[in-house]
Amino acid sequence: MDVDLIFKIAAIGILVSILNIVLNKSGREEQAMMTTLAGLVVVLMLVVREIANLFDTVKALFGF
Amino acid sequence: MVRIAGIGIVGAVLAVVVSEKKPEMGMMIGLAFGALALAIVAGKAGAVIQLINDSVDRSGIDANLIVPVLKVTGMAYITQFAVDACRDAGQNSIASKIEIAGKIMMLAVAAPIATALIRMVTTII
């Protein structure tokens, strides 16, 4: 849960950048862009869940 | 504390590695670290808040007066987090808009205390 999330995001980032390079080299620019977009959305989902968790904690803590 | 420091170092190294190719992923790592670290710390802060509430209860101060103070503190934390995230992404204008919105909402929460003070002064006079 703790460091796992950061490792996960870093792994997705490296994977997506490698896929991006491979797809770009083989001349499929639009698929490379789609991969980048998909990776970004997946990571955004992970991060947004964690931020929502944080905001809920702060809200519960300070009695909103 | 040690855990947060360790996660921070690991996150910084990974962010540098990843943001060479994908700057947006580096930003995401920063954001994820911020959320994780603050969530860990928030659990500890709960005891302090409990202590403040207990002291206020025992001292006989009106409990309604301390609620806005805690609310403003929480809003300040949330605003600061969002502003820092936007600054990291290089969106300074969005960051300052969030700042202004946070200030206005804090003012709205704090206004009843100010009016209560004015009312108190007028009753004394």
Image (cartoon, coloured by chain):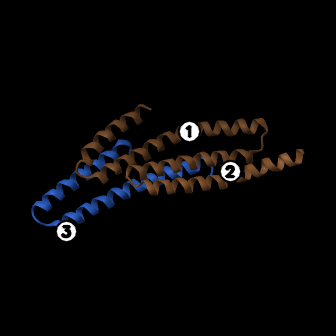
Q: Which chain is blue?
A: A
The CA span between labels 3 and 1 is 48 Å
Q: Which residue is mark 3?
A: A30
Query: Which residue is more in the foreground, B24 or B61?
Result: B24
Give the mark, 2 or 1, whose residue is nearer the N terminus: 1
In the rendered image of the structure, the colour used to display chain B is: brown
Task: Identify residue type, mark 2.
Answer: Ala
* Neighbours of disc 2 within 10 Å: few (<14), some (14-19), many (20+): some
Q: Relative to B66, is B107 above or below?
A: below
The CA span between labels 2 and 1 is 22 Å
Numbered disc 3: what chain?
A: A
Instruction: Judge left or right: residue B51 versus residue B37.
Output: right
Instruction: Judge left or right: residue A46 versus residue B19.
Output: right
Query: Which residue is more in the foreground, B23 or A53?
Result: B23
Q: Which residue is mark 2?
A: B110
Numbered disc 2: what chain?
A: B
Q: Where residue A48 sits: x, y (%)?
A: 42, 56
Q: Which residue is mark 1?
A: B45
* Neighbours of disc 3 within 10 Å: few (<14), some (14-19), many (20+): few
